[in-house]
Amino acid sequence: GCTATLKRMNRHYTAEDVEQAVKKIRKVFSNNCGIPIDVITGFSGETEKEFDESLTFVRNMAFSQAHVFPYSRRENTRAASMSQQLSNAEKEKRAHQMIAACTQTQQDFRKRFLKKCIPVLFERQADTGEWEGFSPQYFPVRVISNQNLHGQIKNVWITEVDKAACLGHLEHSL
């Protein structure tokens, strides 16, 4: 979300390019399409101001899912020899802040589906007995069912959103 950081990372796009692409996707596919993002925090030379810019960007873009991880220095790369390396503690601190922001946008996105019926592709049964699957927007959904749902697509009424997933019940299980 910070063009200066993206440039140092040798990315050939800007934060504005990403924003415009997301806006086009949402215009064509609706605001209910899921758009995930990968975020690296603490890249070489990332200032507090640049991190804040990325944090604001992620909050404003309201991504449906995020994979956040601190920059990991790799020997024999251009980035490894850059000055202004951040401490591991600072990279971790920023990653935790970013994860908190992304968790909120994920939950806000998932709440759009409360009291709605959506198709879910079920993949596995958890140790708790709940079946877990994914919506077309690629967010996790859990239901309780005595049926073997593995590999099946079932309509699910979403009744609750927690930090990890949406919870619901099968359309005809009331």
Image (cartoon, rainbow, N blue to C red):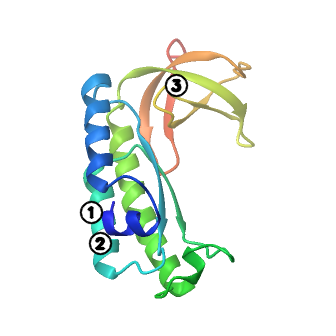
Q: Could you say which is closer to the camera, residue 40 or residue 101?
A: 40
Circle 2: element type: helix
Going from N to C along the chain, the mark reached first, 1 or 3, is 1
Q: Badge 2 local density, few (<14 within 10 Å), some, or many (20+)? A: some
Q: Could you say which is closer to the camera, residue 79 or residue 71?
A: 79
Residue drawn at x 71%, y 18% is 147
**Which one is in front in this view, the residue at disc 1 or the one at disc 3?**
1
Residue type of the residue flagged with mark 1 = Thr
Q: Quadrant of the N terminus?
A: bottom left
Q: Could you say which is closer to the camera, residue 88 or residue 134?
A: 88
Circle 3: element type: strand
Question: Are the residues flagged by discs 1 and 2 in contact, CB closer than 8 Å?
Answer: yes
Q: Is residue 149 left or right of residue 35?
A: right
Q: Is residue 92 left or right of residue 19?
A: right
Residue drawn at x 39%, y 65% is 7
Q: Is residue 82 above or below residue 163?
A: below
Residue type of the residue flagged with mark 2 = Asp
Residue drawn at x 27%, y 63% is 56
Residue type of the residue flagged with mark 3 = His
Residue tagged by mark 1? 56
Q: Could you say which is closer to the camera, residue 74 or residue 27?
A: 74
Distance between the alpha carbons at the discs numbered 1 and 2: 6 Å
Residue tagged by mark 2? 52
Residue drawn at x 49%, y 85% is 86
Question: Are the residues flagged by discs 3 and 2 in contact, CB closer than 8 Å?
Answer: no
Q: Is residue 64 above or below residue 6?
A: above
Residue tagged by mark 3? 169
Going from N to C along the chain, the mark reached first, 3 or 2, is 2
